Image: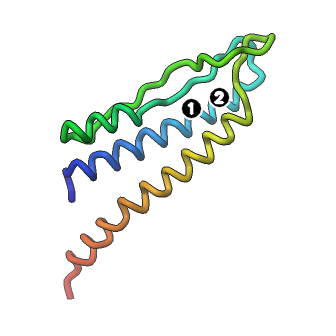
Amino acid sequence: MLGSVTSNALASTLTALSLRQSVIATNIANINTPDYRAQVVSFEGALARSIEEGSGVISPTVTRSDEPTKLNGNNVNLDVETLASTEALLRYQFAAKAVEGPVTGLRTAMRTN
C-alpha cells in the first residue's frame, strides 16, 4: 500500500482538499474587502491524469475566480463558498477514511504479543 498510486493519490487529495478549505476560509474572511477576487483550488483533472500515468502525485493550483464582481469589485459569494466548504469537508472525511483502513491493517499486522 505504501508508495502505491492509490496511497499517493489519497495523500495528494488530502493535501489539495486541505488547501481548498484554507482558500475558502480566506475568501470568506475577505467577503467585504473591496476589489478582493475569490480564489479557487483546482486539482481533480491533474489528479486523474496523474493516476492514469501511474503516479498519483500532484500539486494543486490556486487561481482567481472569474465570477462577476459586485460594485465594490469583490466577487466572493457566501452561498458558493459555504457549499464548497461543505463539499470539501465531506470529501476530506471520505479520503481520510480510505487512508485509515490500510493503516489500521498495518498496525494490526505489526502488533506483537
Res. 96 image quadrant: bottom left
Q: Residues within 10 Å of mark 1 (few under 14, many from 20)?
A: some
Say if 38 sits above or below 13 in the image: above
Does residue 52 appear left or right of residue 70 in this picture? Answer: left
Q: Residue furthest right?
A: 71
Mark 1 lies on a secondary structure that is helix
Disc 1: which residue: 23
Residue at 74 percent across and 26 percent down: it is: 31
Q: Position of residue 65 (x, y in %)?
A: 59, 20
The mark total stands at 2
Quadrant, the C terminus: bottom left
Q: Residue at x 65, y 19 (%)?
A: 67
Image point 72% across, 28% down: which residue?
77
Q: Position of residue 35 (x, y in %)?
A: 70, 11
Q: Is residue 19 above or below residue 75?
A: below
Confirm or deny contact between disc 2 and disc 1 (CB under 8 A). Answer: yes
Relative image position of residue 28 (x, y in whole percent): 69, 32
In the rendered image, residue 27, in percent from the top left (x then y), is placed at: 65, 28
